[in-house]
Every structure is written in C-alpha cells, then in structure tokens.
Image (cartoon, rainbow, N blue to C red):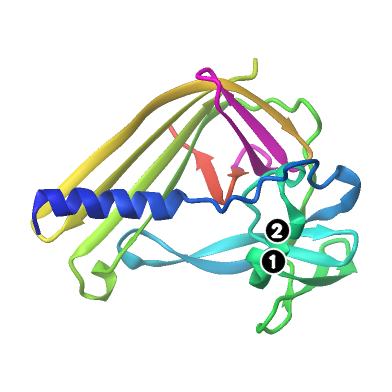
Amino acid sequence: MSTHRLRNVSFWAATAFLMLQPLHAQGGGLSAGDVDGVCLVKGFRTGVGGMRLPVWRPYLLLKDGTAYKSPKLAPDSLDVAQSRQSEASSWGTWTGTGNDRTISMPGQTSMTSAQCMQPADAGKSIQGNYKHVGGGGNTVSGGHASFMRSDNYRFYSDGRFISRSSSGLIAGSAAVASSDGTRTGHYRIHDYSIDLRYDDGSEAHLFFYADGDQLLHIGDADYVPSN
C-alpha cells in the first residue's frame, strides 16, 4: 500500500473516529430539571487492531421515562427532537430507582444498570493528566491493518487545560503517524457537562461525568490518569 493511500486511510479513519452528528440545539437543550440521572451498562467496544474490549456505556435518563445511549454532547446543547429523529435507535425507555434501573432499547433485551453517576457540582475543578486510547483494524482476526488514536488532556485547578491528540496507522510494512498539535483553553464543569473554551475562540460543549479522580468521561470516551 502506498504512503499516499495510507495517509488517505489514516485521515478517513481519524475523521470517522471523531465525527459527531450535528445535534447541537439551536435554542436551549435539556435543563438540569429534565435529567433524572446517568447510569452505566456493561458493553463492548473495538480497540486497537480490532480487539474487543469491555466498556461501561452511559445512558442519559430523562424524567419523562426515556433513555439516551452514549451521549456525546452536553445535555444543555443536545437538540433532543433532532436526535430522536436522526438516531432513533439510540433512544429507549427506563424504569426503576437508585442504582437499580432497567433500560430497554429498540431490538434489544432489557438491560440492568450496574452503577449510576452523580452530576458534578457547578464550578468543579480537576487536576492532572488524563488519556484515552482508541482505534480499530483487523490484526486480531489475521488482517494487516491497525489504527490507533490517543487523546490527552491536562487539567489545572485554576480552570485551564491543555489538549493533545495523535494517531497512527500500520498496514503491512508501511506506517504513518500524525499529530493534531497542542491546544489550550479554559474549562467549566457543571451537572453532566464540560464546556471547553479554546484560546483560538472555538468551543466544545461535551457530555461529562467523573468517577472520583480515577476516571473522567468526556464526550463519548473514558479518560484515565496518565503520567
């Protein structure tokens, strides 16, 4: 495979890996009063080389009895009406109380939650380095391609953050690596949301919860402490 083709594959894979559907609310999204909680159900994801890895998948539970699988955007940025239309399979229903919730999704057997996460206090600060590693490929099944992407955040207690991303593709004897460089900005955490305001003027409003200081869930990915 040529280096040029590898670059095209790497670009396509990275784009597919990061792409979020345009579900930003034009007006207001969900309010804190619309949300009953966030509960986790065990599932699986594809890792580097095609490995099948366990993951705790979050469901956003609304007080109207509906459940939204694997949120990416902050609840107050989510266009619920558009989401229900464009990704109907991600919406289901829930019953129960506390950590004991039963979640029903279209075409699936009912699932029981393992743990429910509390919303963050407004203005919560975090400190430290956190990393998520994801990817894909087919080397596990005897293929020759493996893709990896690493996303890193360093958070400071004064509200600043630094983010870095890198990716790599190996196919046969050829390999390509790339880096998205370093970005800086300010963060603000509230409820199940993290607002990232970059110094270049861009913003991202993402789904968020924390399990102590051992795990941060940002967007649709788990981040764990790193050196």
Would you call the spot at circle 1 few (<14 residues within 10 Å), some (14-19), or many (20 or more)? few
Left or right side of 137 for 109: right
Kind of residue at badge 1: Gln
SS assignment at label 2? helix
Number of numbered discs on residues:
2
Left or right side of 136 for 4: left
Residue 163, image x, y percentages = 47, 29
- Quadrant of image for the C terminus: top left
User: What segment is highlighted magenta in the picture?
Assistant: 192-215
Kind of residue at badge 2: Gln
Residue at coordinates 39% horizontally, 60% vertically from top-left? 47
Residue at coordinates 32% horizontally, 53% vertically from top-left? 12
Residue 179, magenta (yes or no): no
Q: Which residue is mark 1?
A: 85
Would you say the magenta stretch is mainly helix, strand or loop?
strand
Left or right side of 156 for 66: right
Residue 224, image x, y percentages = 52, 42
Residue at coordinates 9% horizontally, 59% vertically from top-left? 1
Q: Which residue is mark 2?
A: 82
Front one among 226 and 191: 191
Asked whether disc 1 touches disc 2, contact meaning CB atoms under 8 Å apart, the reply is: yes
Residue 63, image x, y percentages = 90, 59
